């Protein structure tokens, strides 16, 4: 349990420092007292799940970030070891290769768009950018009402706070790397 406390504290301190926030500012954002936050950062206190929810909501980070193990200097990811998120039956398979990490402000996915895929993405927060690298096939994007076709070995960057959708009306599967970058507020 002590290791978990230290890890949660390190994660909290890392987020706070990356966002250049004082303990007072974090306290105001999260509605958690400054002394409680200091104890959590030092690993002297084990926060309840409710406290972690308040902190994650106030700092705009996923709760799971606080529960991650301390990472090594490198990480090898085997796509076959990840279970995909399936959308539209199995027409879109999304693999979270590197989930959101607030110290890096990004997340990376591998996505397969089968023929007939028509995915309408939710608009993200202002200041979010998306990078899409087509590895195989081609993909039709509708960005704020404008059609753009991206082909194999091409890339695109666009603001994620506009309406956008991913379509594969073509006769072969499209595979892509997708990076979502959250600019610092």
Image (tube, rainbow, N blue to C red):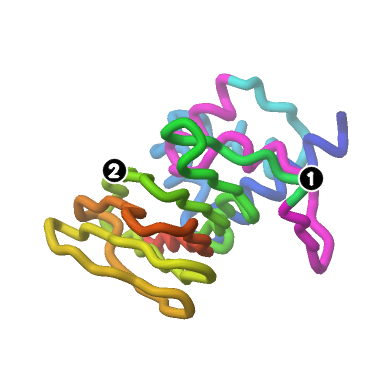
For this rendering, which residue is in front, 123 or 80? 80
Residue at point 46%, 51% (across, down): 113
Residue 125 placement (x, y as % from top left): 30, 49
Residue at point 71%, 49% (across, down): 10
Circle 2 Cα neighbour tier, 10 Å, few/some/many (<14 / 14–19 / ≥20): few
In the picture, the disc for residue 120 is 2
Residue at point 27%, 63% (across, down): 159
Residue 171 placement (x, y as % from top left): 40, 58
Q: Which residue in the structure is indicated by mark 1?
A: 69
In this picture, residue 173 sits left or right of residue 129: right
In this picture, residue 122 sits left or right of residue 92: left
For this rendering, which residue is in front, 48 or 133? 133
In this picture, residue 31 sits left or right of residue 74: left
In the picture, the disc for residue 99 is none
Residue 30 placement (x, y as % from top left): 45, 34
Q: Range of the magenta residues?
A: 50-79
């Amino acid at each position: 349990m002590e290791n978990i406390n230290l890890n949660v504290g390190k994660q909290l301190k890392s987020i706070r420092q990356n966002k250049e926030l004082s303990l007072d500012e974090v306290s105001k954002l999260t509605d958690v007292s400054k002394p409680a936050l200091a104890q959590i950062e030092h690993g002297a206190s084990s926060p309840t799940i409710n406290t972690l929810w308040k902190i994650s909501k106030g700092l705009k980070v996923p709760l799971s970030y606080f529960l991650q193990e301390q990472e090594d200097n490198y990480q090898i990811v085997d796509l076959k070891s990840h279970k995909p998120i399936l959308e539209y039956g199995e027409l879109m398979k999304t693999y979270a290769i590197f989930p959101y990490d607030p110290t890096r402000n990004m997340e990376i996915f591998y996505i397969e768009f089968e023929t007939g895929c028509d995915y309408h993405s939710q608009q993200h927060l202002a200041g979010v950018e998306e990078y899409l690298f087509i590895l195989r096939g081609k993909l039709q994007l509708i960005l704020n009402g404008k059609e753009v076709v991206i082909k194999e070995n091409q890339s695109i960057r666009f603001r994620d706070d506009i309406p956008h959708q991913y379509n594969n009306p073509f006769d072969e599967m499209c595979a892509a790397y997708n990076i979502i970058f959250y600019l610092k507020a």
